[in-house]
Image: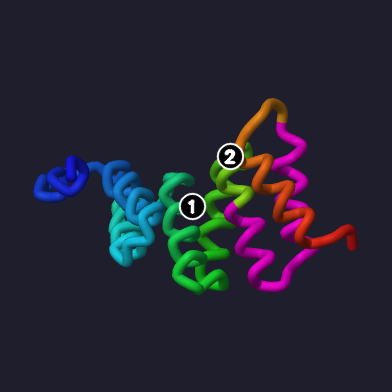
Amino acid sequence: AHYEALLDDAQVSPMVLNNLANLYLALGDERALPMARRAHEAAPQVAEISDTLGWALVKAGDPQRGLAYLRDAVARNASSLEIRLHLGIALQQLGRDQEARQQFREVLAAPGDSPFKQRAQRYLDSLGTR
C-alpha cells in the first residue's frame, strides 16, 4: 500500500516502481509485468530493473523475450547471484541446458553463503550431469 501510494507522485523513482514490480511478482499479481515495464522505461540502464523485467517475462511464460533483459542485466552486474540465477532458469526453460548449467555454476562458485546458491544447486541437480 505504501509503494502504491507513491505512484501518484509524478516524480516516482524507477526503483520504487521496480520494488513494487518485485512485490507484485512475489504475490503472483498480474500487475507485475506492466510495473516492471514502467520501471524499465524510466531507467533501462539499471541492472536490477532489467532483471526484474526479464524475470517478470519469464514468470509470465515468455522466457525468450525475458532472455535479452536478463543478459543485459548480467552484463551490467555480473556479480549478482540473483540475476545469474534468473538467467539460468530462463535458459533452462528454453532448453539451453549447457548455458543454464554455466550460470548455475557461476552462482555456486561465488564466495560466501546465499539462498541463491541453494536454488542454483537444485536447478543444476535437476539438469543432471551431462
Give the overall secondary structure of the magenta segment: helix
Applied colour scheme: rainbow
Residue at the right extreme of this rendering:
130
Q: Mark 1, residues whose alpha carbon is within 10 Å: few (<14), some, or many (≥20)?
A: many
Q: Nearer the viewer, residue 48 or 121?
A: 121
Q: Kindly state the secondary structure of the residue where label 2 is placed.
A: loop
x and y percentages locating residue 126 in the rendered image = 76, 60
Q: Which residues are magenta?
A: 86-110
x and y percentages locating residue 101 in the rendered image = 77, 56
Identity of the residue drawn at 89% across and 63% down: 130
Badges 2 and 1: C-beta atoms under 8 Å apart? yes
Identity of the residue drawn at 48% across and 60% down: 54
What number is the disc on residue 80? 2
Residue at the top extreme of this rendering:
112
What number is the disc on residue 3? none
Q: What amino acid type should be assigned to the residue bearing mark 2? A: Ser
Q: What amino acid type should be assigned to the residue bearing mark 1? A: Asp
x and y percentages locating residue 33 in the rendered image = 36, 64
For the question of whether residue 40 can be seen, the reply is no
Left or right: 21, with 96 as reference point: left
Q: Which residue is mark 1?
A: 51
Q: Kindly state the secondary structure of the residue where label 1 is placed.
A: helix
Left or right: 5, with 51 as reference point: left
- Taking the magenta stretch, the answer to whether it contains residue 88 is yes
Q: Mark 2, residues whose alpha carbon is within 10 Å: few (<14), some, or many (≥20)?
A: some
Left or right: 78, with 5 as reference point: right
Q: Nearer the viewer, residue 27 or 44?
A: 27
Q: Quadrant of residue 99?
A: bottom right
Earlier in the chain: of badge 2 and badge 1, it is 1
Identity of the residue drawn at 48% across and 65% down: 59
